[in-house]
Image (tube, grey):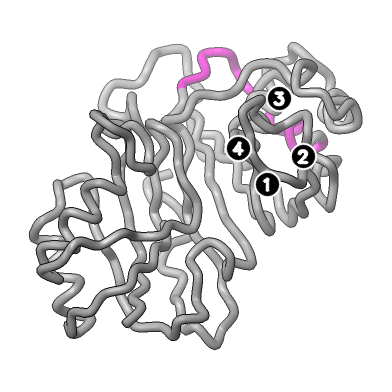
Amino acid sequence: MRIVAIVEYEGSRYSGWQLQDGDRTVQGCVEEALAKVANEALRVTVAGRTDAGVHACGQVIHFDSNATRRDYEWLRGANSNLPDDVAILWTGQVDSSFHARFSATGRHYRYIILNRSVRPTYLAKRVTWEYRPLDIVPMQRAAKTLIGRHDFTSFRAVQCQAKDPVKHLRRLEISRNGEFVTIDAHADAFLHHMVRNIAGVLMSIGAGEKPSEWGRDVLAARDRTVAGVTAPAHGLYLTALEYPEHFGIPRLSSGPGLW
């Protein structure tokens, strides 16, 4: 039986999603909780691995189990064994052709910036702080030049293992709500650190360090060294995954609702 689940987590206390010897990871907590429900060891497959400090509102996993459980039992049983910063929002049975990563047709991320002169307190691990005033108009102009199918080598981490740097960035929108500046990104897939590197470029432009044309120039260079600083992890949220309709995977979140 193949089960799919949607997972939400606050990532500041974890060394990322993926299992690591000696470190606390989201995957480790989820597998341990599900194994107690199934009464057998389980290994989950994730749609997209997140780095240390990154959060998720709509992460998707799948796993195979010999246990016969109702969807409600998987959900309640796992959540009763998960820490308070991880929760399973939905579960369902799918056929064996479903793969959390390879069946996905789209991915959505949100990057949240607290833009004020004073550092955050209770939001310290949930947003990125930028003390310099950000002008979102040049950021929006720069964002438009990145939309489309491009070689995003300039925006990938040096250690990125993706074979193809060409991705289709379908949407990149910047908005402001009071002290919060939000970057919403939607693509077929993302390279390692791609959203954080885009955020770093856009923040430099919004702060007046670079002109809006710099985003286009960075993209054209296909050179990571010209793109500047990678934005911090704790402002980043994986908000949703898209799948073909026949799998019946709901989209539960459009992103954090506080901003």
Lateral position of residue 183 relative to residue 179, left or right: right
N-terminal of the pair, mark 4 or mark 3, is 4
Instruction: From this view, report whether residue 113 is shown above or below residue 78.
Output: above
- The boundaries of the magenta stretch are 129-141
Q: CA distance from mark 3 to mark 1?
A: 14 Å
Q: Amino acid at mark 2?
A: Ala
| Circles 4, 3 touching at the beta carbon (< 8 Å) | no
Label 2, secondary structure: give it.
helix
Mark 4, mark 3: which one is toward the viewer? Answer: 4
| Circles 2, 4 touching at the beta carbon (< 8 Å) | no
Q: Measured from the top left, where is residue 184 in percent x and y?
A: 60, 47
Instruction: From this view, report whether residue 14 is shown above or below residue 44.
Output: above
Q: CA distance from mark 1 to mark 2?
A: 7 Å
Q: Measured from the top left, where is residue 60 in percent x and y?
A: 42, 62
Q: Which residue is mark 3?
A: 201
Lateral position of residue 3 relative to residue 131, left or right: left
N-terminal of the pair, mark 1 or mark 2, is 2
Q: Amino acid at mark 3?
A: Val
Q: Which residue shows up at 68% across the image and 25% down it? A: 135
Find residue 155 and report its image quarter.
Answer: top right
Q: Measured from the top left, where is residue 32 in percent x and y?
A: 17, 54
Q: Which residue is mark 4?
A: 192
Task: Give whichever of 3, 96 is nearer the camera.
Answer: 96
Q: Which residue is mark 1?
A: 173
Q: Amino acid at mark 1?
A: Glu
At label 1, counting other C-alpha atoms closer than 10 Å, the crowd grade (few under 14, some 14-19, many 20 or more) is: some
N-terminal of the pair, mark 2 or mark 4, is 2
Q: Which residue is mark 2?
A: 143
Q: CA distance from mark 2 to mark 4?
A: 19 Å
Task: Give whichever of 253, 49 is nearer the camera.
Answer: 49
Q: CA distance from mark 2 to mark 3?
A: 10 Å
